[in-house]
Amino acid sequence: MGLLRNEAVVYKPVEQIDLGHCSNESYFRADKAPRMDGFLLKIFTWFLESRIIGALLLYIVKKNNQVHKLVTNATLVEPPMFIPLHPITDCISSELNQQEIKQIDSDASPPERVQEAINCIPVTSEKSLDDLKPSCFRRWTIADYSRAYSTGAITPLRVAEHFIDAVRESCSPPLPMSFFINYDAEDILRQARESTLRYKRGNPISALDGVPIAIKDEIDCSPYPTTGGTKWLQKFRPCTGDACCVMRLRSCGAILVGKTNMHELGAGVSGINPHYGPIRNPYDPNKIAGGSWSGSAAVVSSGLCPVALGVDSGGSVRMPASLCGVVGFKPTFGCIPHSGVLPLNWTVGTVGILAATLEDAFIVFLFSVMLLLVVNFRHISQPLYLQSYDLCYFDSSLFLEVFMSDTLAQIVLGHRYRQMQIHNNIFAMADVIVAPTTGSAMTKQVLCISDYRKPKVFYDLLDKN
């Protein structure tokens, strides 16, 4: 293709880019790539796979979308950034030191971390379940489950039985919800019996003891295979044990209730899985739940679990959380160990949390995280001033495979580093205010509680009847 070499862009070094409000810097705009599906897509794929016509067709598509100009032949001085790891800057550290900070012992066990997280959260209502039910619709939280078990209002075994009945009901026609790919009723009941016995003896492991938690089928969790939403992956990559995050959940006494359904290999945002059925939205079963973390979002929204785990690369946690009306949290890359997770997008993906409330997401995050500096929410009175980073959706392993060229992949990954530096410079000139989300969310819930709508598909696992 030497004779067909296109013009190339020489990118300015980041320090020479004018980021002021009077900047004359311009954006490059590419033409839209062809959009096709069905039979036309099959024909296009057939042409692409042919040796001569495929190479020419791919060259034309890249040229029309300025890939050669902006990427292939481009020149930039920034080094490639293979993993989006960002150090905590002195600016952030100094600002955090002005707040009430809780230092967690690095040797603390997961149950001890759960207790530390609960100590950092404002005291929740001490009302009984019977007092809370008539007032308004609300999803039960980790604290609600723990309080119900401790007072003897209900047992983990009874909750597990309710859960199994609810899952079976959700799978029935005419609109099966397709929440789970795998769940084992006997294993769930075994965990529930053990938890019930611990509460009877008065020695629960932690506030998570007996709490049902679902796992996305992208994370290893015994005794289930990890399919990634496919019918074949488990044959080539057998699950040999729990992922690190699942192991910590199990050590806290949580009841791991199964593997939730997902968009096949996480490569989509609809949650329509051809093998295990489309995941339906609990608010309207005729609509999608979002993706790729569809099943986990749906089980939390429907009340089957207060918390579920998933993996987020480009929105797999946050998009279905938005569509299903619950909290979706993608932690900073590298905070939660990635061992035991399918390496689909391992240089940008991270274990994420979906929960009924921000407090529950915080509790599960704290015992999973490797960084041990957290803000004590009880003492927040002023807004937090933090810097933010743009984690570009570039997966290093994917680009190395697609481009089959270390040099070209480094150019693409250089853009990741370049964008991070540009955003750092932008935020250095502006105050980015992040209000204390726990307090504001609680206030919003109080103000809008009468309008907080109950999903059409909802299960009350703490109902004694």
Image (tube, rainbow, N blue to C red):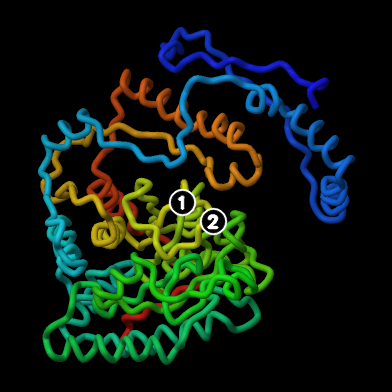
Q: Residue at x 22, y 69 (%)?
A: 143
Q: Amino acid at mark 2?
A: Leu
Q: Is residue 451 visible?
A: no
Q: Residue at x 13, y 54 (%)?
A: 104
- Residue 344's disc is 2
Which image quarter holds the C terminus? bottom left
- Whether 333 is drawn above or below 261: the answer is above
Which image quarter holds the N terminus? top right
Within-10-Å neighbours for mark 2: few <14, some 14–19, many 20+: some
Residue 262 quadrant: bottom right
Marks 2/1 in contact by CB < 8 Å: the verdict is yes
Q: Amino acid at mark 1?
A: Gly
* Residue 81, horizontal then vertical, whole percent: 45, 35
* Residue 233, horizontal then vertical, whole percent: 60, 70
Q: Earlier in the sequence, mark 2 or mark 1?
A: 2
Dot 1: element? loop
- Whether 140 is drawn above or below 335: the answer is below
**Residue position for label 1:** 349
Dot 2: element? loop
* Residue 74, horizontal then vertical, whole percent: 62, 21
